[in-house]
Image (cartoon, rainbow, N blue to C red):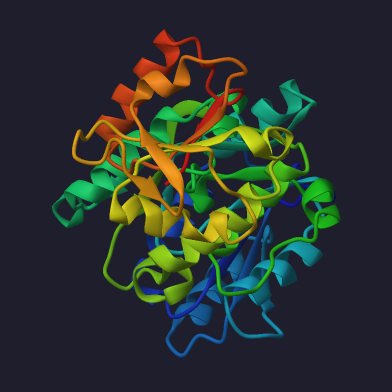
Amino acid sequence: MSHAVPALSILLPYRNAAATLEACLASIAAQTCETYELLAVDDHSGDRSADIVRDRAAVDPRIRCLASPGRGLVAALNHGLGAATAAIVARMDADDVMHPERLARQLAHLRDDAALTLSASRVRAFPDERLTAGFREYLRWQNACLTPADLDEEIYVESPLAHPSVAFRRAPVVAAGGYRDGAFPEDYELWLRLHRLGHRMAKLPEVLLDWREHAQRTSRTDPRYGREAFDRLRAAFLAGDPRLLARRGELVIWGAGRRTRQRCARLLQEGFRPCAWIDIDPRKLGNRLDGVPVCSPDFLEREPRPFVLVYVANHGAREEIAAGLATLGYARGRDWLAVG
């Protein structure tokens, strides 16, 4: 069924995805929302991927077969973004599976809230036997980030959105510069950029995407998705966050261990200097790091209130620190932020 003006454009870049494309395309064809166009962008595949897409397109006029003029994911994404005709674009990856109501729910979410730029959803990772304990914890944390306030307060911890689960308004993303190529994860960089520009993002509470985990995923093999790249990207955006800049002279860093200092080094290289380090280890209390004292949490019972960056990475410890800061009257997002 063809529609002159689709309600939504699905942006699906792919490269050598023959093993998973059939399941992905079948999940798109099964959507309850039928008024879409599917922009399938071939990133120079060397397998049967393009043939699979062309075979589907021969019987479904909603599918547009595109070839990326450049190389790599970002070039394919921006080519598809430029070709999209709908005002709303939904991302999809060739190794994932949409739930039947996904497009309808996200379309309604964006139509019902005109101030919302991006709608995502909770995700389920599969197959279960490939999920490590660390990845399960990341999914638990990510699926708990739902509201615009959650995303605003948690955005420096990790990427709070699964890229193939998002749908966004095309115009503001294009105006913001689209996807950018560099030594960083292109999706997280876009979320941070939209956040800096003041765009509201939210997540539906339903699981609307099955997110495939496998050893060949780009995030597992490309250094642009490694720890160093994330730390560098976070520091660059955190250094320009108005909340931090407004209280630059009152900065406190929670976590005085060696690993914490390594992770926050990039922010300090941006010209920030804490007035104290906070720790609960009695062996560290009273020491000085680069001339700055290591203090107990009692240091925070002072006026004017400092701005606290919690660099403790362990999720359980981070939650205990959050509870302690709340007891002291510190508001998350206003008086403190967690950093991954």
| 138 left or right of 330 in image | left
Front residue (pair 282, 129): 282
Residue 257 higher or lower than 214, as above or below: above
> Residue pushed farthest left?
129
Front residue (pair 266, 167): 266
Residue 168 higher or lower than 224, as above or below: above
| 279 left or right of 59 in image | left
Q: Quadrant of residue 200?
A: top right
The residue located at (61%, 48%) in the rendering is: 238
Residue 71 higher or lower than 190, as above or below: below
Instruction: Tally the marks.
Output: 0
Residue 203 seen from this side: no
Q: Give residue 82's position: percent from left, percent from top.
A: 80, 65
Q: Give residue 222's position: percent from left, percent from top.
A: 42, 76
Q: Quadrant of residue 43?
A: bottom right
The residue located at (63%, 72%) in the rendering is: 74
Q: Give residue 84's position: percent from left, percent from top.
A: 77, 59
Residue 193 seen from this side: yes
Front residue (pair 117, 45): 117
Front residue (pair 158, 96): 158
| 318 left or right of 31 in image | left
Q: Quadrant of residue 22?
A: bottom left
The residue located at (63%, 43%) in the rendering is: 167
Q: Give residue 73's position: percent from left, percent from top.
A: 58, 73
